[in-house]
Image: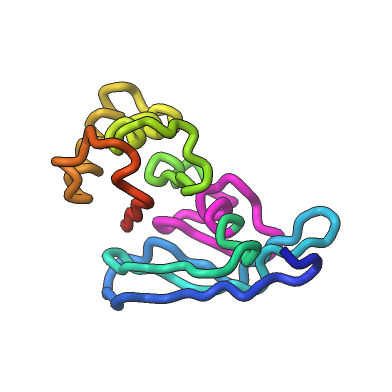
Amino acid sequence: MSRGRAQKTQVGRARSAPGMEVVRVEGLGKTYPGGTKALEDVSFSIEKGEIFCLLGRNGAGKTTLLRILATQLKPTVGRASVLGHDVLADPQAIRPHIAVVPQEARPQMLLSPYDHILYFCLIRGQSRAQARERTKKVMEDLGCGSTATSSHRTFQAVFVSA
């Protein structure tokens, strides 16, 4: 990661889908204490149903951007909204609808996909009943019904879109 200079992150789209905007980022930037710039003037939007890809080399700011969108980190400049809610002004309205599980931070290496989703729903404060219901829906939406109890080694990454 270079000090004092943000790497350019690439944004790609598989298709454009008219409809509700689920993510909007305008002039977003993040400078950490000490002057390290992780993001600089990032702008894009994602519409409901759109497949979105965020690419960049290590240190480009991908994780910083996702942490800002997940309301885990505050931007230094710019604005971001998820599902129409500003990440700074209304984080509580966003959190029940999202989850971020970085590939490099898998805390429970032996969990099945079902158990992994259930675990994160519980961490996010859902009751056991809510977590089971949400996990079942996510597994169905992803077409993973037959792999619900398979070993984690079957999967490298799961991408969920709104």
Between 116 and 16, the one lying in front of the other is 116
Horizontal and vertical percent position of residue 27: 61, 72
Q: Nearer the viewer, residue 104 or 81?
A: 104
| Nearer to the camera, 12 or 90 | 12
Could you tell me which residue is drawn at 27 percent across and 75 percent down?
18
Position above or below: 109 against 143: above
Q: Which quadrant of the view contains residue 146? A: top left
| Quadrant in which residue 115 is drawn | top left
Q: Which residue is drawn at the image coordinates 37% and 28% (left, top)?
A: 126
In this rendering, the answer to whether 105 lies above or below 161 is above
Work out which residue is located at the far top of the displayed protein and give it: 128
Residue 13: x percent and y percent?
37, 76
The C terminus: image quadrant:
bottom left
Q: Does residue 77 appear to the left or right of 84 in the view shown?
A: right
Locate residue 57, reporting x and y percent.
58, 68
Give the extent of the magenta segment: 65-90
Horizontal side of 134 relative to 1 (left or right) equals left
In the image, residue 123 lies in the stretch drawn in magenta: no
- Does 71 appear in magenta? yes
Report the residue at 49% width, 69% height from top: 55
Quarter assignment of residue 139: top left
Q: Is residue 31 left or right of residue 66?
A: right
Count up the numbered dots.
0
Q: Quadrant of the N terminus?
A: bottom right
- Name the side, left or right, on which 120 lies relative to 143: right
Q: Residue furthest left?
A: 146
Q: Position of residue 104 (x, y in %)?
A: 52, 47
Q: Residue at x 76, y 67 (%)?
A: 2
Q: Is residue 69 above or below residue 149?
A: below
Nearer to me, 62 or 69: 62
Color encoding of the figure: rainbow
